[in-house]
Amino acid sequence: MNSYNKSIIPIIEAKYDSLTNVEKNIADFFINNKNNTDFSAQNIAKEVFVSEASLSRFAKKCGFHGYREFIYQYERTFMRRGEVTADSTRMVLNTYQDLLNKTYSLMDEAQIARIVQYLFEADRVVACGIGSSGLAASEMESRFMRIGVDIDSLQDTDRMRMQAVFQNKRSLVCGFSLSGETKGVLYLLREAHKKGARTVIFTANDKDIYTDFCSEVVLLASLQHLNHGNMISPQYPILVMIDIIYNYYIRHESYEKADMYDDTLRALKSGIEYDSRII
């Protein structure tokens, strides 16, 4: 059985685009560092050619009270990461394992419980995204529709703009954008929020502006800074989070939802049998 360890590297990656150039240099050091060295502010300031004040500002940008708290957490989760020679299969599998570890590090159990409650309370759910994120939105529709959720997925910007008109206080809008910059997704989230809908963005790029129009910001594992991360489907971090939410939702009313899932499965099978008789 695999073990998962909490790390603050995914937090740094999620904040990366909002950092100044100096802070990005600090972030690069901690993301790429493989040596268990002297992490005192004085030593790291010399190592990265920045001031100790810059280290403090960087730590606060990452959500810590200061550099001391940041480095305490960093040292607790630090693991010496040596280069591993592996065949192609192991390279891909190791990358998947890294992504799972990142997902675990970013997990907020209380947040997932709130989103599940939103799903139960919503009269209608909309999941939206473009490209690979749109395929993940379609997968969410397929999964949750089979257990009784009134859900629709949108992969077209024009449809997102039109659907924004119909959202209300009983709606839940889930927007998928790893970059956090997909215009159609952000438009729908903003407009739905104005109409009182609950809104959730799933992204690998944490920005302060999301709190202006999103009920929840769900951080996803980033494919950046991973060896062979370009070999992994960009959908994967989103699908993992959808599976986690789906599992929470099923466990909330396991018997009822399991029966509903079995009913949809029987309906699909009966349709296949009917089509075969016609042929």
Image (spheres, rainbow, N blue to C red):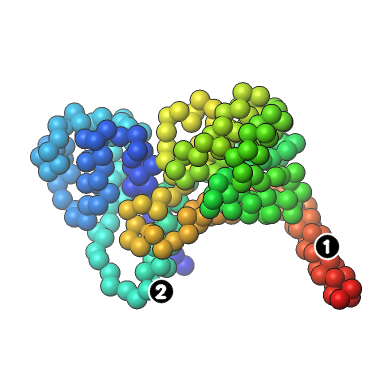
- x and y percent of residue 218 in the render? 50, 41
Quarter where residue 216 is shown: top right
Q: Amino acid at mark 2?
A: Thr
Q: In front: 216, or 165?
A: 165
Q: Is residue 218 visible?
A: no
For the C terminus, which image quadrant? bottom right
Q: Secondary structure at mark 1?
A: helix
Structural crowding at the residue carrying mark 1, measured as other residues with C-alpha within 10 Å and reported as few (<14), some (14–19) or many (≥20) = few
Reading the image, the residue beneath label 1 is 267
- x and y percent of residue 14 in the render? 39, 42
Quarter where residue 99 is shown: bottom left
Q: Is residue 207 above or below residue 91?
A: above
Residue at point 22% right, 52% down? 33
Q: Is residue 40 above or below residue 3?
A: above
Give the mark nearest the N terminus, 1 or 2: 2
Q: Secondary structure at mark 2?
A: helix
Which label was assigned to residue 89?
A: 2
Q: Amino acid at mark 1?
A: Ala
- x and y percent of residue 219 in the render? 46, 43
3D distance between C-alphas at marks 1 and 2: 38 Å
Q: Is residue 208 visible?
A: yes
Which label was assigned to residue 207?
A: none
Quarter where residue 264 is shown: bottom right
- x and y percent of residue 17 in the render? 35, 38
| In the displayed structure image, the side of residue 25 where residue 8 appears, left or right | right
Residue at point 49% right, 28% down? 211
Residue at point 50% right, 57% down? 236
